Image (cartoon, helix red, strand yellow):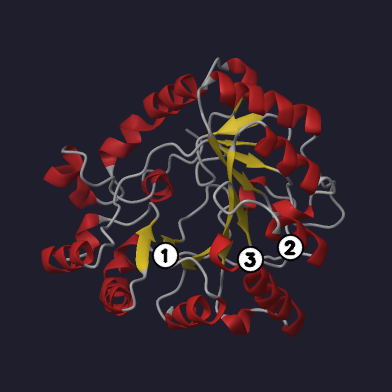
Amino acid sequence: MNILFTNFCNKNCPYCFAKGKLILEKRLKRSYISLKNLKIIVNFLKRSKEKSVGIMGGEPTLHPKFKEAITMLLSQGMRVTIFSNGIINADIVGFLQNLDKNKCSVILNINAPESYTKKEWSMIKKTMKSLNRSIKLGFNIYRLDFNMDFIIKLIQDYNLDRSIRVAIANPLLGQNNVYIPLKEHRKIAPKIIKFAQKCDSLDITLNFDCGFTLCSFTERECGKLFYYNSPLKTFCEPGIDVGPDLIVWRCFVTSMLWNKRLTDFRNTFEINKFYINKFMPFHRMGATNKCFKCKYLKRGQCGGGCLGHTLKFFHLEKA
């Protein structure tokens, strides 16, 4: 489960996967999760026998009581992963630096260096220098001319975790974020394989997020990824996010559908079961015409692309 500490961000990435739940206009009200609601979530997680949690936003470190909130989670025995853009104030970086790396880590979503201002890039480098092995870099592919080579240098220069989270931007219902159409996915596969080979030679592992399709890669390419210790992930399960107001949804891409309250459920098992049942028919459709006869889709080896593609393909945005 992921907890949204804030509903706003200090960056506005073109592919942002959270646009549907974020406040991007300064005139609108910003909100933070209260320590009271956080305690409700913690009790829910403990009742569910869950021992790990993701912290998201927006940019979660913008929460005015970020330190108190993280301290509370850790004191309750939670293993915390913070999803951040790395543009973090120095006092928060110092706080994170003093935490047990085995109990609190950061997935730093990184973009190409040229997409930042000089000040932003300086802050990100200071964050990496201070937190080093606590940080795993994540990269979102949202255009065909992407280049991930700079990530390797960052890992080497700042002694970061030797694995990279690789995701592909997906369409968000009701939003106009930037993403690569499913029919173009095949074009990115050779670049990913080449990069994976380079990472393998340096003992760096690629961890694939959901959204990729099996048919975007050849059998030989899938085999190479296996030998590079970076097997492809082509099926997704509910991620489950809970907002500051205790509203829950399956994942950001489908966050406009079937929102419920955390208190509507007794545990995380019930939430997962609810969303699996709701979205299973769409998983069986896939996002292209050829998915209908695909044995890999029928056998559950591939999800037919992100559900965002499927819902748009069948014009089911308001299902």
Q: Please, what is the three-letter code of the amino acid marked with disc 1?
A: Ser
Residue assigned mark 1 = 163
Residue assigned mark 2 = 93
Q: Please, what is the three-letter code of the amino acid marked with disc 2?
A: Val
Q: Position of residue 12 (x, y in %)?
A: 68, 65
Q: Is residue 294 visible?
A: no
Q: Residue at x 70, y 66 (%)?
A: 11
Residue depth check, mark 1 versus mark 3: number of the one nearer the observer: 3
* Residue 77 left/right relative to 72: left
Neighbourhood count class around disc 2 (C-alpha, 10 Å): few under 14, some 14–19, many 20 upward:
some
Q: Residue at x 67, y 79 (%)?
A: 116
Q: Is residue 223 visible?
A: yes
Residue assigned mark 3 = 131
Q: Secondary structure at mark 3?
A: helix
Is the residue under label 3 in contact with that under label 2 (CB below 8 Å)?
yes
Q: Residue at x 55, y 15 (%)?
A: 266
Residue at mark 2 to residue at mark 3: CA–CA distance: 8 Å
Residue at mark 2 to residue at mark 1: CA–CA distance: 21 Å
Closest to the observer, 61 or 52: 52
Closest to the observer, 96 or 263: 96
Neighbourhood count class around disc 3 (C-alpha, 10 Å): few under 14, some 14–19, many 20 upward:
many
* Residue 148 left/right relative to 305: right
Q: Secondary structure at mark 2?
A: helix
* 153 w.r.t. 242: above or below: below
Q: Please, what is the three-letter code of the amino acid marked with disc 3?
A: Leu
Residue at mark 1 to residue at mark 3: CA–CA distance: 15 Å
